[in-house]
Image (cartoon, helix red, strand yellow):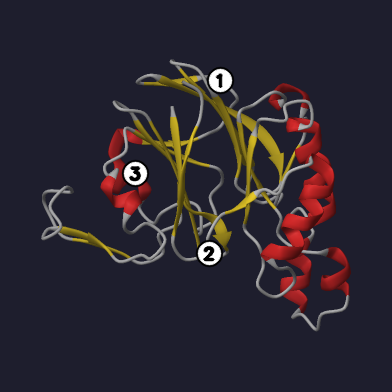
C-alpha cells in the first residue's frame, strides 16, 4: 500500500492526505477553502476546477477519491459543501467502527482537539499489508491501539518555549492548547513507534509563528531515534510506500 501526503496538515490554511493502492483512493481531510464548481463532469478540468494549492498536482492525479474521511468539521479539514462535491463518498465520522473501502480498511479513533468539533485520527490497514496512522490535529486519547504501525503522521504544531515568548494575538494563543507542541508530540510518537525502528514518521501542521521544521525534527529525533520527514507547507510531499 502506498501513502501520499499532500500538504498533509502542514499549514492552518488547508489539510489533505491521500492514501491509495492500485485500485483504491482514500482522502483524509480536504481543506479546500477555494472551490469553484462548474457542472456536470467532476473529472473534466473544463467543468470542475479546484483552485487550491493544497490539493493540486499529485493529489488531483488521484481524483476522484473512493471515499473522503474528515477528521473534524473545521473548514481547513472539511471542504465546503462536502456532501455535494463528494456525494456518497463523504464520511464525517461519528463513531469508531471500521470502514471497508476497496482493499483498505479505515478505523477512526478519538483525538483531543477543539471541544466544539469532535475530532478523530485514522488507522488505515492495507489488504496487502501495512498499517498507517494519521493524526491530522490534536492529541490521541489512547496510543496503545496505535502501536506498531508502519507509518505515522503526527502534528508538531508549536514549540511551547517559543510560543510563551511570542507576541501572539489572544485568539491565536488560545488555539494553541488544542494542538500538540513538539514535546508532547515526541512522547506520543515514541509511544506509537518507539518499539518499531523501521517505522516511517512524518510531521506537519508546523506553525510558521511558533515553530520551525528544523526544531520540530530535532525534538522528534531525540525521542524516536531517527529524523522524521516533514510534510511541505505548500507542495505535495514525497510518496511514502507502506507495507507490501
Residue highlighted by disc 3: 83
Residue highlighted by disc 1: 97
Q: Secondary structure at mark 3?
A: helix
Residue 55 horizontal side relative to residue 14, left or right: left
Answer yes or no: is residue 109 visible. yes
* Closer to the camera in the image, 90 or 51: 51
Few, some or many residues within 10 Å of mark 1 (<14, 14–19, 20+): few
Compared with residue 207, is residue 20 higher up or lower down, i.e. above or below?
above
Q: Secondary structure at mark 1?
A: loop
Task: Give the mark, 2 or 3, whose residue is nearer the N terminus.
Answer: 3
Residue highlighted by disc 2: 233
Which residue corresponds to the image point at 51% horizontal and 23% vertical from the top-left?
A: 243
Task: Give the mark, 3 or 1, whose residue is nearer the N terminus.
Answer: 3
From this viewpoint, which residue is outermost toward the bottom?
167
Q: Give the mark toward the camera: 2 or 3.
A: 2
Few, some or many residues within 10 Å of mark 2 (<14, 14–19, 20+): many
Q: In the picture, residue 145 is in which quadrant?
A: top right
Q: Quadrant of the N terminus?
A: top left
* Closer to the camera in the image, 120 or 58: 58
Q: In the picture, residue 144 is in which quadrant?
A: top right
Residue 233 position, x and y percent, is 53, 64
* Closer to the camera in the image, 211 or 27: 211
Q: Secondary structure at mark 2?
A: loop
Task: Give the mark, 1 or 2, whose residue is nearer the N terminus.
Answer: 1
Label 1, label 2: how many angstroms apart (C-alpha)?
31 Å
Which residue corresponds to the image point at 77% horizontal and 80% vertical from the top-left?
A: 168
Which residue corresponds to the image point at 78% horizontal and 71% vertical from the top-left?
A: 173
Which residue corresponds to the image point at 70% horizontal and 75% vertical from the top-left?
A: 209
Residue 22 position, x and y percent, is 30, 27
Amino acid at each position: 500500500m502506498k501513502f501520499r501526503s499532500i500538504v498533509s496538515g502542514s499549514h492552518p490554511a488547508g489539510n489533505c492526505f491521500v492514501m491509495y493502492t492500485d485500485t483504491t483512493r482514500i482522502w483524509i481531510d480536504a481543506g479546500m477553502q477555494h472551490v469553484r464548481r462548474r457542472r456536470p463532469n467532476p473529472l473534466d478540468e473544463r467543468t470542475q476546477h479546484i483552485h487550491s494549492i493544497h490539493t493540486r498536482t499529485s493529489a488531483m492525479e488521484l481524483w476522484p477519491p473512493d471515499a473522503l474521511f474528515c477528521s473534524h468539521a473545521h473548514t481547513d479539514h472539511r471542504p465546503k459543501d462536502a456532501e455535494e462535491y463528494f456525494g456518497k463518498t463523504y464520511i464525517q465520522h461519528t463513531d469508531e467502527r471500521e470502514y471497508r473501502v476497496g482493499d483498505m480498511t479505515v478505523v477512526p479513533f478519538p483525538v483531543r482537539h477543539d471541544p466544539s468539533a469532535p475530532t478523530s485520527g485514522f488507522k488505515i490497514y492495507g489488504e496487502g499489508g501495512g498499517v498507517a496512522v494519521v493524526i491530522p490535529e490534536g492529541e490521541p486519547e489512547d496510543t496503545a491501539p496505535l502501536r506498531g504501525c508502519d507509518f505515522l503522521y503526527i502534528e508538531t504544531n508549536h514549540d511551547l518555549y517559543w510560543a510563551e515568548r511570542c507576541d501572539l494575538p489572544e485568539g491565536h494563543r488560545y488555539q494553541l492548547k488544542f494542538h500538540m507542541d513538539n514535546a508532547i508530540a515526541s512522547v506520543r510518537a515514541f509511544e506509537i513507534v518507539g518499539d518499531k525502528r523501521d517505522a516511517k514518521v512524518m510531521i506537519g501542521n508546523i506553525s510558521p509563528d511558533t515553530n520551525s521544521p528544523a526544531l520540530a525534527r530535532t525534538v522528534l529525533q531525540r525521542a524516536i531515534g531517527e529524523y522524521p520527514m516533514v510534510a511541505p507547507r505548500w507542495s505535495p510531499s514525497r510518496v511514502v510506500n507502506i507495507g507490501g
